[in-house]
C-alpha cells in the first residue's frame, strides 16, 4: 500500500508538471502594449485546491495547491486570457515545475444550430467547448499536448461557473485518461476566484499608520 501511495504521488507530480510553462509560456507576442479600451478586461484572483485519484476516490494533495491571477480580455466573442500560478506551500517539492508558472488561453465563440460553441488554443493544448449566451456556464475539453503516451492522462476538462452577481468564478480542472468513451480519473483542482474591475477612488484607499 505504501509503495502504491508513493508511486501515485510521483505520477501526480509528473502530471501536474504538464500545467507548467516548461520554459515557454506560449503567450502571443505583440509590438504594442495591450489596452483596456478595446475590450472588456477582468482580473480574477483566487486559489486552487488539488486532489489526486487514488484507490477509487479523490484525496487532497495540499502541497500542490496554488494561488493565481488571470487577466481575461474579452474582445466580443473572442477572449484572450493569461494565467499566472504561484505554488506557495512550504512542502511543495518542485516536481510539478517552477513555483511560478504562466499559461495562455485563447477562446473564439460562435453560434451553431442555436448553440454557443467555442474553439480553444492554449499553452496546454487545443480543443472545444460549450457555453450559454451570457457566458455563465462553460465547459472546455481538450487533448493534452506534448506529453508521453505512457502518461496517466491525455485529456483536460475545465468546467466553469461564472457567478457575476456574487463576483465569483468557480472552476473545476480535471485531468484524466480518455480511452474511447471511458474516462479514467487522475487529478482534479477545485478553483475559486474573485472578480476585479477598474474602479476610481475619492481618496487614497490606504495610508501609513
Image: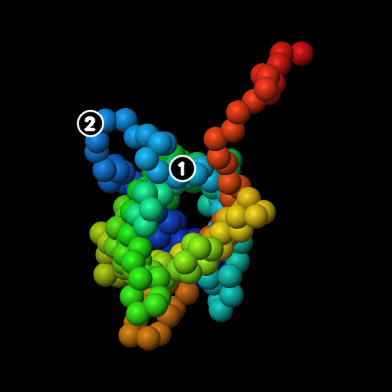
For the C terminus, the quadrant is top right
Q: For label 2, count other residues whose C-alpha is less than 10 Å away and answer few (under 14), some (14-19) or many (20+).
A: few
Q: How is the image coloured?
A: rainbow
Instruction: Report the side of 172 relative to 31 (left or right).
Output: right
Residue linked to disc 2: 31
For the N terminus, the quadrant is bottom right
Instruction: Report the side of 48 relative to 178 (left or right).
Output: right
Q: Tell me where residue 93 appears, x and y as whole percent.
A: 49, 46
Q: Nearer the viewer, mark 2 or mark 1?
A: 1
Instruction: Specify the label residue 4 is tagged with.
Output: none
Indicate the quadrant where residue 50 lies. Answer: bottom right
Q: Tell me where residue 174 appears, x and y as whole percent.
A: 47, 67
Q: How many marks?
A: 2
Residue drawn 60% across and 28% down?
200
CB-based contact (under 8 Å), mark 2 and mark 1: no
Residue drawn 35% across and 63% down?
109
Instruction: Specify the label residue 41 is tagged with.
Output: 1
Name the residue furthest bottom: 181
| Residue 112 shows in this picture | yes
Residue drawn 61% across and 47% down?
194
- Using the numbered discs, state the Cα–Cα distance from disc 2 to disc 1 in whole angstroms: 20 Å
Q: Is residue 14 above or below residue 156?
A: above
Residue drawn 47% across and 66% down?
133
Instruction: Report the side of 65 relative to 150 (left or right).
Output: right
Amino acid at each position: 500500500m505504501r509503495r502504491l501511495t508513493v508511486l501515485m504521488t510521483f505520477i501526480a507530480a509528473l502530471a501536474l508538471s504538464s500545467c507548467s510553462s516548461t520554459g515557454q509560456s506560449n503567450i502571443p507576442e505583440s509590438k504594442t502594449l495591450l489596452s483596456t479600451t478595446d475590450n472588456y478586461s477582468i482580473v480574477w484572483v483566487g486559489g486552487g485546491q488539488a486532489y489526486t485519484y487514488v484507490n477509487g476516490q479523490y484525496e487532497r494533495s495540499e502541497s500542490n495547491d496554488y494561488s493565481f491571477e488571470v487577466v481575461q480580455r474579452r474582445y466580443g466573442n473572442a477572449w484572450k486570457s493569461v494565467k499566472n500560478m504561484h505554488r506557495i506551500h512550504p512542502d511543495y517539492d518542485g516536481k510539478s515545475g517552477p513555483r511560478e508558472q504562466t499559461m495562455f488561453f485563447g477562446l473564439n465563440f460562435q453560434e451553431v444550430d442555436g448553440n454557443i460553441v467555442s474553439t480553444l488554443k492554449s499553452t496546454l493544448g487545443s480543443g472545444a467547448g460549450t457555453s450559454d449566451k451570457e457566458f455563465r456556464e462553460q465547459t472546455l475539453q481538450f487533448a493534452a499536448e506534448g506529453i508521453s503516451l505512457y502518461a496517466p492522462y491525455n485529456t483536460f476538462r475545465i468546467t466553469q461557473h461564472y457567478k457575476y452577481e456574487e463576483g465569483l468564478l468557480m472552476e473545476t480542472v480535471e485531468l484524466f485518461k480518455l480511452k474511447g468513451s471511458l474516462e479514467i480519473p487522475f487529478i482534479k483542482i477545485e478553483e475559486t476566484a474573485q472578480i476585479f474591475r477598474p474602479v476610481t477612488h475619492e481618496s487614497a484607499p490606504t495610508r501609513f499608520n
